[in-house]
Amino acid sequence: MEKVVVSIGGSILVPGENDAEFIGKLAEMLKEVSKEVQLAIVCGGGKTARYYAGIAKELGGDTYEQDILGIAATRMNAQLLSLALGDMPDTVSADAEETARLSAPGKIVVMGGTVPGHTTDAVSAMVAASMKADRIVNGTAVDAVYTADPRKNAFAKKIPSMTIDELGDIVYKEHGASKSSVFDPLGVKLAKENKIDILIIDGRNLDELKNAILGKKINGTFVNSH
């Protein structure tokens, strides 16, 4: 049975519109595909994380303190998804290796962030490395990797496939310019070292997400780490 880690952005889970309906449908799809692949899910914080981190900054909080609040938001999202899956724990795992250990065929393990300084993209790569996953599926607000930001550049072209080194070139350049990046540089490094493919897709498109998890053809970007 193949092993897959899904990194799903908080803005995908809880954008503020029809959230319960979407999370419910997502949970049903995950339960269905868990019969075919071994799954671990890492949830991002999204707008909730940014909102609380922003307030913390206004109150004089440093980057570490802002990250602590952002991580709390990721764990709330993880608990919401766990609830939809039928088993909301009092706390969610805060350790990538523990999540990998808990993962088993037919059992979906859900977690959020771990410690300040580690994005949930990086955490998903840590989980994937620990459980020797076949691929990481990154469900984002943008449906693929593009030559430029498609939300700002009408001439941006979708990149259907690329190597892990090519993705690295993009994210290291992006990371140097701002905090936002198509995938976290540490996550790219870990995926390369452990030969784990990355699929970057539209996380709100459940058919696309399902295909990516099952290793079928996608409309997003396939990043080859082999």
Image (cartoon, helix red, strand yellow):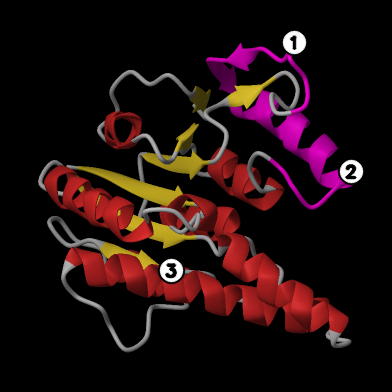
What residue is shown at x 28% (from left), y 29% (from top)? Answer: 211
Residue neighbourhood size for the residue with mark 1, other residues' Cα within 10 Å, grouped as few (<14), some (14–19), many (≥20): few
Residue 168 counted in the magenta span: yes
Disc number at residue 177? 2
Distance from label 3 to label 1 (Cα)?
35 Å
Distance from label 1 to label 2 (Cα)?
21 Å
SS type, badge 1 = loop
Q: Which residues are magenta?
A: 152-181
SS type, badge 2 = helix
Residue 59 sits in which quadrant? Answer: bottom right
Residue 212 sits in which quadrant? Answer: top left
Residue 97 counted in the magenta span: no
Q: Which residue is mark 1?
A: 155
Q: Amino acid at mark 2?
A: Ala
The spot of residue 150 in percent (x, y) is 69, 24
Disc number at residue 77? 3
Disc number at residue 224? none
What residue is shown at x 58% (from left), y 75% (from top)? Answer: 71
Q: Nearer the viewer, residue 206 or 163?
A: 206
* Number of on-image labels: 3
Going from N to C along the chain, the mark reached first, 3 or 1, is 3
Q: Amino acid at mark 1?
A: Phe
SS type, badge 3 = helix
What residue is shown at x 43% (from left), y 68% (from top)? Answer: 77
Residue neighbourhood size for the residue with mark 2, other residues' Cα within 10 Å, grouped as few (<14), some (14–19), many (≥20): few
- Nearer to us of marks 2 and 3 is 3
